[in-house]
Amino acid sequence: MSSLSVKMISIFASIGIVLAGCGSDAATKVENKPAVKAAKKEQTIEKYYFTANEGGTISKISVKDNKITETIQADGVVHNIQLSPDGKVVAATLVPETGHGHGGHGEEAAGKVLFYDAFTNDLLKEVEVGNHPAHVVYTGEGKYVLVTNNEDDTVSVIEAKTYEVVKTIPTGNGPHGFRVSADSKIAYIANMGEDTVSAINLETFKEERIKTGNTPVTTGVTKDGKTLAVTLFSENALAVVDLETKQVVKVEVGTGPAQVYIGPDDKYAYVANQGTEESPSNSMTIVDLETKAVVDEIKTGNGAHGVTVSGDGKFAYVTNMFDNTVSIIDLDSKTVETIGVGEIPNGITVMD
């Protein structure tokens, strides 16, 4: 079984390691009440979450009953996925089949970002980016879509309205997972090939690097912009960074942490512990960002990789790469439901 993310992690470890009638007013008010209620009922929008499956599909699952409603086919490795801020569009990174072999860089096809209507599943646009695109993230105000190009050491900036690449910015070695600050001003990109995070200013497009630790995979940032969380795969740790002082505190988590997601209240960081294909890990660690301590560890499936949290903070969703499943975790009761999805699920995103 071939896995892009596992290969990315293994490579770097080896070198140093979320779619008028007539009548009186009074009569109108009375007669329309049932109609208004019926209209409101009809306007109830079903919510979904999506997984990016490296086997070449996207799984679309109902939040209501955790049943797959659609399997969207893609020609290549689907690595990561995210919904637009308004929840109407879902973007996914794709490494084309012709670009996932062992040929030279000159033989590889450029990576793509696929944009789908989150409700109808229609393909809206394909945008060509760099080699081996890893993660895709919308800025909070919906102006830009950013994509890390893992083999080019760059990030592509796409204008969301026009689907045009407006900027390509150099990063550190092996850019991978990232998040954008709540004010949409800074993207914090984990550079897996070194011990840094690239902080990209989205107004000036200038880069600053922050030292964090070995093999950073993904980042998260609190809404106040004061705290950065970074998974350190080779150190089995979460780096908690004070963005004002750049002081780093490392919190021991599970083996081979992959993605991290900061919950809506900014209190906890949720860390998916993947391990390796040969020695998989199977847990999600919850870290209190204020005390910088582990408060819980919950069992998932093998190869826990992608993680996200519902907008109300009630559920965490974790992709289990080596089991082809998703774990849905009730964060109050800590109970876990597991469902099957596509082959090698990686990234995951959920409608708020």
Image (cartoon, rainbow, N blue to C red):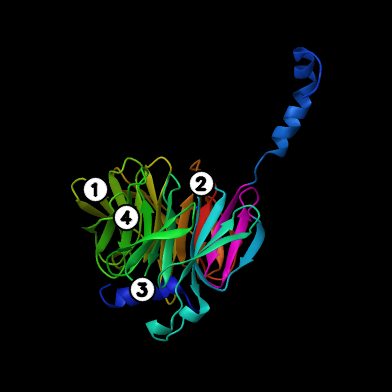
Chain-order first, disc 3 or disc 2: 3
For the record, the magenta segment spans: 47-66
Taking depth in this image into account, of 167 and 239 the one nearest to the observer is: 167
Q: Which residue is pictured at 58% across the width and 70% down the height?
A: 74
Q: Is residue 292 visible in the rendered structure shown here? A: no
In this view, the mark in front (2 or 4) = 4
Circle 3 sits on which residue? 151
Q: Nearer the viewer, residue 258 or 350?
A: 350
- Residue 35 position, x and y percent, is 77, 28
Identify the main secondary structure in magenta.
strand
Q: Amino acid at mark 2?
A: Ser
Q: Residue at x 71, y 36 (%)?
A: 41
Q: CA distance from mark 3 to mark 2?
A: 32 Å
> Which residue is labeled 1 in the image?
243
Q: Earlier in the sequence, mark 1 or mark 3?
A: 3
Give left or right: position of 208 versus 51.
left
User: Which one is earlier in the sequence, the residue at label 3 or at label 4?
Assistant: 3
The reply to whether dot 2 and dot 4 touch (C-beta < 8 Å) is no
Mark 4 packing: few (<14 Cα in 10 Å), some, or many (20+)? many
Look at 64% across and 47% down and name the residue there. 64
The Cα–Cα distance between marks 2 and 4, rounded to whole angstroms, is 22 Å
Q: Position of residue 1 (x, y in %)?
A: 51, 79
The amino acid on which the numbered mark 1 sits, given as a three-letter code, is: Leu
Q: Would you say 58 lies left or right of 27 here? A: left
